[in-house]
Amino acid sequence: MRRFTAAMALTRNKIRRSRGFSLMTDQQETETFPKMPAFDYNPPAYDGPSAADILSKRRQFLSPALFHFYDSPINVVEGKMQYVFDESGRRYLDAFGGIATVSCGHCHPEVVDAITKQLNRIQHSTVLYLNHSISDFAEALASKLPGHLKVVYFTNSGTEANELAMMMARLYTGSHDIVSLRNSYHGNAAATMGATSQSNWKFNVVQSGVHHAVNPDPYRGVFGSEAEKYAKDVHDLIQFGTSGHVAAFIAESIQGVGGIVELAGGYLAEVYDIVRKAGGLCIADEVQAGFARTGSHFWGFQSHGVVPDIVTMAKGIGNGIPLGAVVTTPEIAQVLSRRCYFNTFGGNPLCTAAGHAVLRVIDKHKLQHNAFLVGSHLKQRLTLLQHKHDLIGDVRGRGLMLGVEFVTDRHSKTPAKAQALHLMGRMKEMGVLVGKGGFYGNVFRITPPLCFTMADADFVVDVMDYALSKM
């Protein structure tokens, strides 16, 4: 009888392995996991290559710098709204994809319809000919921004947007010096990797004229929440590290890759004043915090009570389509009229049709309000979870851009990197996907599509609670 049971278990595990499921022990099978919310969709059978085949080709033909989440990476073959499906048809709640690319939800039907209609008309460069798609979207996008931020440059990515913004600032001011924050992330090209903090060694490339200010991190920062002390560091950098003049200060409204770090209250207002007195421009990197994600405002910088000179954006702007943008004032925009600047595919009809549809969907379905309501509920529940589990050192963020930092000791704030990795894998087994970030790799980045529901939020917390209780 024992041999028969063992044989049955072996057969069962072979089937599970072939379908992409993680193997479970008999003890795990008797456990009652939190139940995923119902969702009225079943994907068609997948007949493409397996996860193992794809991984083998990646290793052979793609960049060795590529990495993936989980020891056994998921082969994501389909997405619907806040869910993704693997090759076996298993459904996962995507609590991270919003920050990666998706704002409205995977394959949102209204965005897909706009893309399909435009693709059936024309897909062409916008440099030499006219097409209403780019101008209509530029008008709609400018209407979402305050003050004189009315001139739009379209790019293909956030990296391109930040590169262009820094170049414009240097040309406009005649200064070469840029101030950015430690623990920041601004892109993967030469100038943006230079602006990405030297303390974030994974992305930094040394660039002349780039100065990194002390990070105004209320949780791990050297001055706690004392914004004026962090701002003085920027003042001193400009006065003693440059000629007293600066081209620009660039910062994310909430640091994304750095671990969902909110800047100390009042910091941006003080720094913007310091930078402008030194002749510089203020650049708001809204690639991750923009497009209604913070809930209380459409743009992250608005919660700081400031108006930047240049705003950059990408990712959520196109709901998965490669699209970025720089928005600035007519006065600053004039600097490029004296140069020959163009972007062959930035603002092409297909991508701008997608971007315009995203704005319509956010407004039509009140996704900013949803981000505020669901995000507030999710943060409240995560904060209660912090009181229950000592491994949680900090819960932070706004709307549907939340971070959970894990530590082995709350007093010393010793990063719990191994525990975070284990917990991340355990949650995947139960059907929840979260992101990871922070300098130590010990922060969960919870940034789902803006269509996330209260039930989805509860499921994330219930799964995290269950996984923590079993560690």
Image: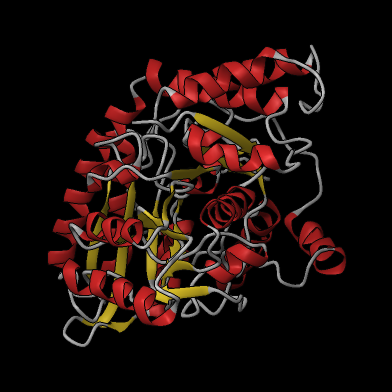
Residue in view at x 46 percent, y 20 percent: 361
x%, y% of residue 233?
29, 76
Looking at the picture, tell me which residue is in the foreground, 396 or 68.
396
Can you give x and y, in whole percent of width and height, for residue 85 in the image? 59, 41
Q: As displayed, is residue 149 above or below residue 65?
A: above
Count the labels in the image. Answer: 0
User: Which residue: 33% across, 64% down?
Assistant: 467
Is residue 83 something that shows in the picture?
Answer: no
Residue 29 falls in image quadrant: bottom left
Residue 6 horizontal/vertical position (percent): 59, 69
172, 404: nearer the viewer: 172
Left or right of residue 289, residue 195 in this image: right
| Quarter of the image that includes the N terminus | bottom right
How far from the left and from the top, in percent, is residue 165?
Answer: 55, 50
Q: Is residue 99 left or right of residue 120?
A: left
Residue 251 as seen in the image, left or right of residue 465:
right
Residue plotted at (31% across, 78% down): 236
Residue at the right extreme, as displayed = 61
Q: Nearer the viewer, residue 26 or 108?
A: 108
Q: Quadrant of residue 69?
A: bottom right
**Res 27 → quadrant:** bottom left
- The quarter in which the C terminus is drawn is bottom left
Q: In the picture shown, does residue 160 fall above or below 43?
A: below
The answer to whether residue 456 is seen in the rendering is yes
The figure's colour scheme reads secondary structure
